[in-house]
Amino acid sequence: MIKLNKTSIASLLAIALAIVLANTAMLDQAKTKEVASSSLKVTKSKANKAKEIKINWQKPSENKPYPKVADYPKMWVKVSKAKQRTYLMNGSKILYTMYCSTGSGGDRATPEGTFHIQAERGDFFYNQESGEGAKYWVSWKDHGVYLFHTVPTDSQGHFVESEAEKLGKNANSHGCIRLSVPDAKWFYENIKEGTKVVITNS
């Protein structure tokens, strides 16, 4: 049997205490990291929610009047597929920004390049093949094939809300450029034949 003197016992107690304190410190450190990580996740979640823009496809995209076309004889239209936005431009200045949805890709992609508004336009169409229609359409390529128009409708002209809710968020059309109902109506009534349209993936 080993006999321990007072000095040895004190040393062992000191070592044991040091081990306990070290373990406690490690646990506290781990808890601190866990709390910090949780706080960061909450912060990011709040930031992401703040970035989410509520888009109402039944209203104009901006809370301001549409520009008067007569005041901007060189107005042109820019479409960003990356941002799902359509811009009314005067030179390099953005006059008005519209939410849009472009083609979903592949054989339903929206062509990129420079085009011009064509003569064809109308207040309603329905495509039996795709099972979708739209209101206030304006052609910009292939004379009635590629269009600006409202969010899609059924054959009776009722808007398909599940598709309309994707406006400005997802590229989900068959290649045309979808706009909110008021934006498309204004576009149909005001944008002139021959207006330049530039579509980019940036």
Image (tube, grey):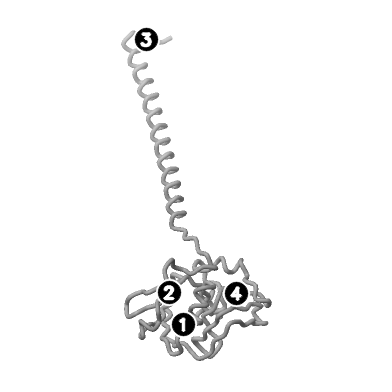
From mark 1 to mark 3, how far is it between C-alphas? 100 Å
**Which image quadrant: the C terminus?**
bottom left
From mark 3 to mark 2, how far is it between C-alphas? 93 Å
Look at discs 4 and 3 and give the one toward the viewer: 4
Q: Residues within 10 Å of mark 1 (few under 14, many from 20)?
A: some
**Which image quadrant: the N terminus?**
top left
- The type of residue carrying mark 4 is Pro
User: Tags 1 and 2 in contact by the CB under 8 Å rule?
Assistant: yes
Residue 163 place in picture, x, y as percent: 59, 69
Residue 44 place in picture, x, y as percent: 43, 50
User: Tags 4 and 2 in contact by the CB under 8 Å rule?
Assistant: no
Q: Which residue is mark 2?
A: 66
Q: Which residue is mark 3?
A: 4
Q: Residue at x 51, y 77 (%)?
A: 184
- Under tag 4, what secondary structure? loop
From mark 4 to mark 3, how far is it between C-alphas? 89 Å
Left or right of residue 100: residue 5: left
Does label 4 or label 2 sit earlier along the sequence?
A: 2
Q: Quadrant of residue 175?
A: bottom right
Does label 1 or label 2 sit earlier along the sequence?
A: 2
Does label 1 or label 3 sit earlier along the sequence?
A: 3
Q: Which residue is mark 4?
A: 152
From mark 4 to mark 2, how far is it between C-alphas? 22 Å
Q: Residues within 10 Å of mark 3 (few under 14, many from 20)?
A: few
Residue 199 place in picture, x, y as percent: 43, 80
- The type of residue carrying mark 3 is Leu
From mark 1 to mark 4, how far is it between C-alphas? 21 Å
Q: Which residue is mark 1?
A: 190
Q: Quadrant of residue 114?
A: bottom left
- The type of residue carrying mark 1 is Asn
Rendered view: 107 above or below 84: below
Rendered view: 75 above or below 81: below
